Amino acid sequence: MRNLLFYGTTNYGRNLTNSDILKFKELSNNFNNFVMTFGIKSEEINHSYVSISYIKKPKKIINQYLKFYIFNLKNLKNFCIDKNIQIISAKDPISGLIPILFKKLYKKDIKIIIEHHGDFLDLLLNQRTTKLKLPIKTIALMISNFVYKNCDLIRGVEKEYTKEVATKYNKINHYFPAWVDYSVFNKKDKERRNLIYVGNIIPRKGTFFIIENFYKFSVKYGFNEKLLIIGESQNAKYFKKCMDFIKDNNITNIEFLGKKSSVELSELYPSSRLLIMASNYEGLPRVLIESGLCATPSLATKIQGIESPFGSSGGTLLYELNDSNKFEKQLKSFIENKNLQTELQKQAYKLSSELSGKDSFLKNWKYIEEKIYE
């Protein structure tokens, strides 16, 4: 078995979740798994199915980027030589800089996979409030061009954009979604009522659009079922805007539930009639896969990462971004049509099972291994 290192700042706690355990156990049937990421202190924890090396995380975000993405070459070199790493999977092109430098400077016969989740540069900048967006984007573009040119394979979560990037850099590619725990998210025989939103409460996710238009829909059609909003309020100003709207209009059928665990979500999805999204950007939304595994259909924006495969293959009703009229029409058609609800439930479950069912994650990684060693 080859030694595979996942390199990036994914938040793996000292005690892994059941989902992470299942993922690495599945992969351990074909790979010796290693992870290098941030932690509360520098240490290495060796589980039987994955060994995780933690680098102490600095408090300031600029120091985090510098420490992990720029000044970690010596640490990575020593780790890869000690563990005989043969494949490195970097979570994005910026994460891939140090692995690429290690390969080129030390002339190592190592394969490097670069993950991406749609247009990562737009996502990176949209999540930051800084006056230095132009120089940051310029530097990030230089790094990503260098990394893409020198990697061995590009792995994406969204089919069309993955092919586009791979064609530009003349690289082999493969696409498959991020890991979803199929053991937790599954169909349950529960009464379906209420609508649900799952995601961070930030402008990019369009939470306020959903609140405002759900309220208008409820008033216009006398709709009394609740909209349950699940997620973290990561933007205080935006969260206040949402809450003020609810308070000012005396809305009683919108309820904030805060952040929920995967187990809690696995009970909420199958008891909900419809998942609603209003994102203006996505790679490939994990919530659509999770809800689909629970046979919960969705209403979402017609954007890259959602239109295909969810809109085209079924399970998701689409509306144009920020189009209130289309949102209302699609929601109305869903609420009034029992046959449509049943059909969308079947389609959502079928598609999500194909994307993230049992052994699909391992099969995709075995395919990648075959391609890079041809």
Image: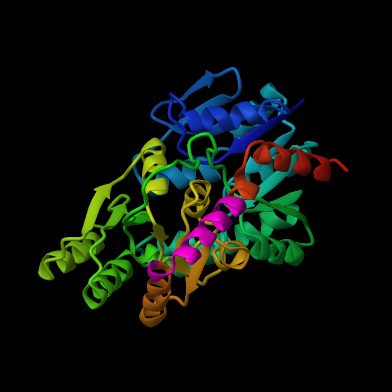
Q: Nearer the viewer, residue 359 or 123?
A: 359
In the picture, the quarter occupied by the C terminus is top right
| 17 relative to 350, above or below | above
Answer yes or no: is residue 234 visible. Answer: no
Q: Left or right? Give the position of 166 relative to 14.
A: right
Residue found at the far bottom of this picture: 325
Tell me the residue at 31%/45% (across/down). Answer: 259
Q: Which of 15 and 183 is in front in this view?
A: 183
Residue 60 location in percent, x, y? 35, 45
> How many discs mark residues in the rendered view?
0
Tell me the residue at 54%/42% (across/down). Answer: 180
Q: Nearer the viewer, residue 205 or 293?
A: 293
Q: Left or right? Give the position of 214 relative to 289.
A: left
Q: Left or right? Give the position of 188 relative to 8.
A: left
> Does the magenta run of residues contain 166?
no
Answer yes or no: is residue 219 visible. Answer: yes
Tell me the residue at 67%/22% (across/down). Answer: 82
Q: Quadrant of residue 201?
A: bottom left
**Prevailing secondary structure of the magenta residues:** helix
Q: In which quarter of the image is residue 222?
A: bottom left
Tell me the residue at 57%/68% (across/down). Answer: 307
Residue 115 location in percent, x, y? 63, 50
In the picture, the quarter occupied by the N terminus is top right
**Snapshot colouring:** rainbow
Residue found at the far front of this picture: 339
Residue 342 location in percent, x, y? 50, 59
Residue 305 location in percent, x, y? 56, 63
The residue range painted magenta reads 335-351
